[in-house]
Image (cartoon, rainbow, N blue to C red):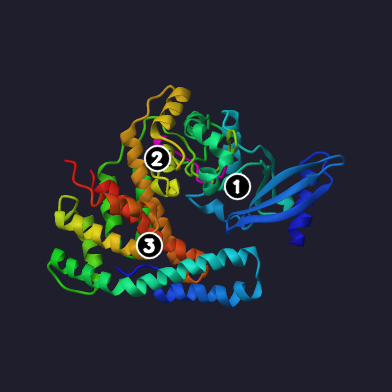
Amino acid sequence: MDSINELLAKAVRRHLPGATGIADLRRLSGGASQETWSFDACFDDRRTPLILRRDPKRLRRGRTTALSIEIEGKTLKAAARAGVPVPAILGMLDDADDLGDALIMQRLEGETIARKLLRDDEYAQARRVMAGQCGETLAKIHATDVSDVPELVVSPALTELARYHDTYRRHNHPHPVFDLAFRWLREHAPETPARPTLVHGDFRNGNLMFGPEGLRAVLDWELCHLGDPMEDLGWLCTCSWRFGNHAMPVGGFGQYDDLFAGYERASGRAVDPERVRFWVILGSLKWGVMCCGMADTFESGNDRTIERAMVGRRASENEIDLLRHLLAI
Amino acid sequence: MQSRPDLVGMVDGVLGFMRSDALKNPGPHAMHHARISINALELIKRELQLGPAADQEEHARLRALLGTDGSLEDLNRLLCARIENGEIGLESDALRAHLWQTTMSRIAIDQPSYAGYRLAQEEGMPARSG
């Protein structure tokens, strides 16, 4: 902790003109390849609330799924230019800072916890506009000019499916419902769009920050890629992200019509509900395979917490969601 | 089909919490994990009560569906392979009923409060639209 404190203070003085040091450093979350820290940069007469995102061992550089910090930062800047509400990037750290791959961004105020957003009175007004705002914001993300970020790879439906199928195979635990879903999705995969757009890749409750008035920011851009824009709409509507509120298919807070109307208003392009449904079903399969991954991580001994084990046991939630979709077809 | 982590793994997870955070680091973090541990113990109890009969019924359905015998795991692997190579699929009423019953009895153990499960109970197995 001390060394991070000192290194970050040095980096802040280097990258933020006038900064004298840092205060209140605390870790918000962390995995091996993704640490998030909260801190304030101190100036003579004020303090600025900031976030440090860090991949200490530079593990994400070699990955095909998660973007490296550098590319994540470039994508965020491009999205900001397209009018997407995002935290401003204030510094890209480099080798001289000795903190691994890292960036400093604005720390915004707002709520990301789904249970509060879906239930608390404070967000009653926001709930009326959330789905439409998500549609408008997705339209802006999909219109983002990414010519500055040539590193982004194209990952259409069949590529996404193949990747999750490999992961499922690696877990080596039979789930006939997953095999049925893989087969149906492979047979019904939409064509690769002629013009793949920027896709956020993880646009859902937890990564969206709201205030009582509505959407404030889109966070966690590390799964960005180029592909089918309907992927983002489908993932937002995937059953697990409704947190029990099935009457509100859009993230548990809105109706398809409001999401689609917001999207069409801002993009001028019609939404194809069948294509969205494809990605909703793929969403349940993805999350189901990820739950199996949690069981794997638990069993391998890398994380023996009961929390991890319990997420592993949520694979069956996705199986029932998949069956409710597939058997009705 | 045996869920993962299995019962021993789940008990181990609760024990791990009891031995470390519960005793050594009490506080909000431990409270959070105490709640999760209670849920885990509830799950373990449900699996002890419901698991053996669910496995037996699943096994019997698999034998009938596949026309062969083997361990529960082997038969599930065989079913996965047949689904993947297209020998059996959504057109089979027996498969549809088997997967529905198996999943319903599995989630009755894993997450009976899951909203999608309650909906599935209310609505029953979806009828084929086409």
Query: Position of B22 compared to B122: left or right?
Result: right
What kind of element bears circle 3? helix
Q: How far is disc 3 from disc 1 in space, using C-alphas? A: 27 Å
Figure check: A256 above or below A53:
above
Same chain under badges 2 and 3? The reply is: yes
Residue A91 in the image: above or below residue B57:
above
Counting from the top left corner in percent of width and height, residue A253 is at 47, 39
Answer with the quarter of the image where residue B81 lies: bottom left
Which amino acid type is marked by label 1?
Ile
Q: How many numbered discs sit on the rendered protein? A: 3
**Which residue is identified by label 2?**
A234
Secondary element type, mark 1: helix
For label 2, the SS is: helix
Left/right of residue A88 with respect to residue B129 in the rendered view? right
Which secondary structure class fits the magenta region best? loop
Q: Which of label 2 and label 3 is nearer to you?
A: 2
Labels 1 & 2 near each other (Cβ < 8 A): no
- Viewer-nearest residue: B45 or A202: B45
Residue displayed at 51% across by 64% down: A307
The magenta segment: A219-230
* Comes first in the chain, label 2 or label 3: 3
The residue pinned by badge 3 equals A170
Mark 1 and mark 2: Cα distance apart in space: 26 Å
Q: Position of residue A199 (x, y in %)?
A: 47, 38
Query: Do the residues at pointers 1 and 2 share their chain?
Result: yes
Q: Is residue A52 magenta?
A: no
- The tag earlier along the polypeptide, 3 or 1, is 1
Q: Decide if residue A218 is in sight here.
A: no
Q: Which residue is mark 1?
A: A69
Which residue extends farthest front?
A121
Please provide percent x and percent y for residue A39: 73, 50
